[in-house]
Image (cartoon, rainbow, N blue to C red):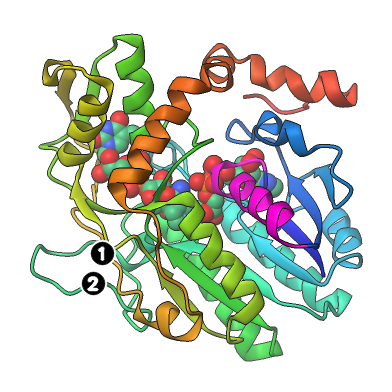
Amino acid sequence: MKILVTGGCGFIGSNFIRLLLDSRDYEITNLDALTYAGNLESLSDLEDHPNYRFVKGRIEDRDLVAELMRQVDSVVNFAAESHVDRSIQDASSFITTNVMGTQVLLDAFRRAGCKGVFVHVSTDEVYGSLAPDEPAFKETDSLYPNSPYSASKASSDLLCRAAWKTFGLPVVITRCSNNYGPYQFPEKLIPLMIINGLEGRKLPVYGDGQNIRDWIFVLDHCRGCLAALEKGRKGAIYNFGGRCEKTNMEVIRSILEILGLSEEMIEFVKDRPGHDRRYAMDTSLAMRELDWRPEVSFERGIEDTVKWYVDNRYWWERIISGQYRNYYRVQYGKDLGVKP
Ligand code: NAD
Ligand code: TDX
């Protein structure tokens, strides 16, 4: 099988490519724009793998996508603008990439007559926010996105559904809860808190710190995406989650404890506007149809993750200094052509 993985230089995409190259004999093309969130260094050890190639480009580039689509069977679409706070500052790139880019991929997949599957990777945030006593989200729930980010992801899900209904495109949509693990960009809660702790900086907690997220180790999510690619029912939506609801304060306390640091490092800051209170996922459909379940406990996953950031200072120090942006020029002899 030949697979186009989009956004493969991001957090989840790079872990997914690693999993594929370790466990399958598929040929992978990684199409990534190398925005600020894309880091070629996350896959530097796999650059020369015979089943892997990197193409720098945007998913909304029709000509490039059409050409690549003629060379593959299936698509796994991770490419997105993914940070809620940035979408509150400026939503425009979220519309371009998440909405328009997804439609370009769908159109090109159809026109090229790809024989495989189009897996669209989405998020629990499309369902909105839960009250403390409400049941976990099901795939049949209505969409109530609350941030520009989640609204753009919900829009892309609906475009995928429309492609399935109108053209019979073999689309599978996955919706996952909050991921954590190696190679996550240090703007997201867990890597930010680990790195601030290691650097002796304050840990900024939004609002009262009682917002609840369902945390899943990234490899469990990647296994789910692979199951969706290989076994997913066409037209289906599958929820993935870690069955691990925790308040932000609980997560931060676990990190401080592993690092042997005091809670005095915590600083309560202004809340995120429109901050979703709680997410929780009902994953029974994926468990039944894909024979999937999360395998890594939070206790093990967070230990491993903290250890990874301690052991891989080089990786995140180059992000903080901006040095990671030079890697493309060093490897490919060309400028990135985009501002960080
Ligand atoms: P990320 O921000 O770490 O990575 C996104 C990648 O997409 C980067 O490599 C970036 O360069 C690339 N990209 C951005 N715009 C592009 C464009 N126009 N064309 C080509 N490439 C582009 O994101 P992530 O956390 O790895 O998330 C991956 C996907 O999973 C996203 O679709 C996100 O919505 C979804 N998701 C993430 C989480 C999570 O907890 N991180 C949970 C559920 C779903
Ligand atoms: O500095 C912070 N302080 C803080 O209290 C940051 C960055 C976050 N938070 C809070 C906000 C959230 O309640 O922590 C929680 C997690 O925040 P993020 O890491 O920004 O994730 P979230 O907004 O929950 O969205 C994530 O999960 C779903 C991903 O970024 C999305 O891409 C994914 O779709």
Residue 15, horizontal then vertical, whole percent: 59, 47
On-image quarter of the N terminus: bottom right
Answer above or below: position of 218 versus 88.
Answer: below
Residue marked by disc 2: 136
| Front one among 299 and 236 | 299
Q: Residue at x 69, y 28 (%)?
A: 41
Residue 223 seen in the current view: yes
- Give the total of numbered labels: 2
Going by the numbered disc 2, the residue's amino acid type is: Ala
| Front one among 210 and 150 | 210
Answer above or below: position of 245 versus 73.
Answer: above
Q: Which residues are magenta?
A: 9-24
Residue 171, horizontal then vertical, whole percent: 63, 79
Picture quadrant of residue 222: bottom right
Q: Does the magenta portion include 333?
A: no
Q: Secondary structure at mark 2?
A: loop
Residue marked by disc 1: 280
